Amino acid sequence: MTRAMTRRHALATGGAGLLAAGLGSTAASAAFGTVRQGYQTNMWGMPTYYLLKSGLMEKYGLKYEEFAVPSGNLTMQQQVARQVDLGTYAGPSFSIGHDKGGLIAIAMIEYVGKTARVTARKELGLTSIAQLKGKKVANQTGSSTGNIFVDQIAKGAGLNKGDYEEVRMDVNNMVSAIAAKTVDAMVTVEPYNAIAEAEGLVNTLVDFYSFDKLPVFMAATPEFVDKNPDAIIAYLKAWLDVAKDFKNNNGKVVEVVGVYYKEKGYTMAAQTLKTSLSRVEVQPGWPADLKPYMQHHGEILLAEKKIKAIPEWNKAFRTDFLAKASA
């Protein structure tokens, strides 16, 4: 399976043409300082990867340094440690990051509930979450999907910790574990679900969308927000263009993202990648139901003692930047 990138400098013109080399060159002239961008290497992070590699950052005068990790909760931890300025992850991780490091959401950028699934080894013939009792379940502990599985999906099926064996594992190692039969099921995201499905290794027990649409936030450190308001507006303009490409230029998106996985050693058919990407809904915005949704998750995290207090959403969410970018 793929190796996790730790850090890469990529400042560029040329978009997809730079992908084979993996590195860019400093833009000749940029209106803003360098953005330290964190993202996860699963499908949740691929819209951000596309943003970086498409030339859209340069279009709006932005330079970047990229920090790629297996899952968004690790990006959140990097931000809390002030190693990264901007990063993406789902609601539970954002609430934890706000609690521990004052992180600020500058936009909800995508829904990924269709990308997250609980699957089981096909030969086991399992059809429900309740049947995971006594089974080995690969789970990226501490991630948003990991928390939702343990706190909502498993509990909702009558399974508490100890009823199944949780095998802590990065999502990018789970398909190998399924193939080796060292685990019975996995809680993971795209493209790993589509890869495992295409190889005939698993069947789906449930996808997260029926439980949770899984909005993903772009969050910033408070210092970055205070010092770079104009850069954030330019950055969100680039995100609005990303959304247009995901909707209207799917071929380009598949091509750019496909190079990433090819470089990481995956042999993934174009249709498998297209299927994975189709489960990501890139929609930068501030939907009306977001605060109630986050309040619900905040209450769960507070009850589980994972945060000290539920965030004040009017302070945690900066909706003004996207409004200006959209004007």
Image (spheres, helix red, strand yellow):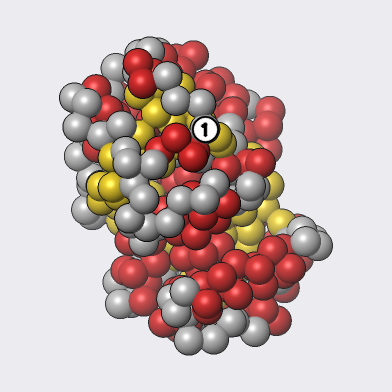
Task: Tell me the element at label 1.
Answer: loop
x 51%, y 65%: residue? 92
> How far from the left and from the top, in percent, is residue 250?
59, 25
Of the pair 245 and 319, the residue shown nearer to us:
319
Q: Is residue 148 above or below residue 81?
A: above
The answer to whether 247 appears left or right of 160 in the picture is right
> How far from the left and from the top, in percent, is residue 236?
61, 58
The answer to whether 102 appears left or right of 238 in the picture is left
x 69%, y 63%: residue? 293
The answer to whether 279 appears left or right of 270 in the picture is right
Three-letter amino acid code at disc 1?
A: Ser
> How far from the left and from the top, in percent, is residue 172?
29, 38
Count of numbered circles in the view: 1
Circle 1 crowding by C-alpha within 10 Å: few under 14, some 14–19, many from 20: some
Mark 1 — residue? 128
Figure quadrant of the N terminus: top left
Is residue 43 at all visible to an observer of this figure? no
Figure quadrant of the C terminus: bottom right
In which quadrant of the rendered view does residue 312 lie?
Answer: bottom right
Is residue 45 at all visible to an observer of this figure? yes
Q: Is residue 188 above or below residue 75?
A: above
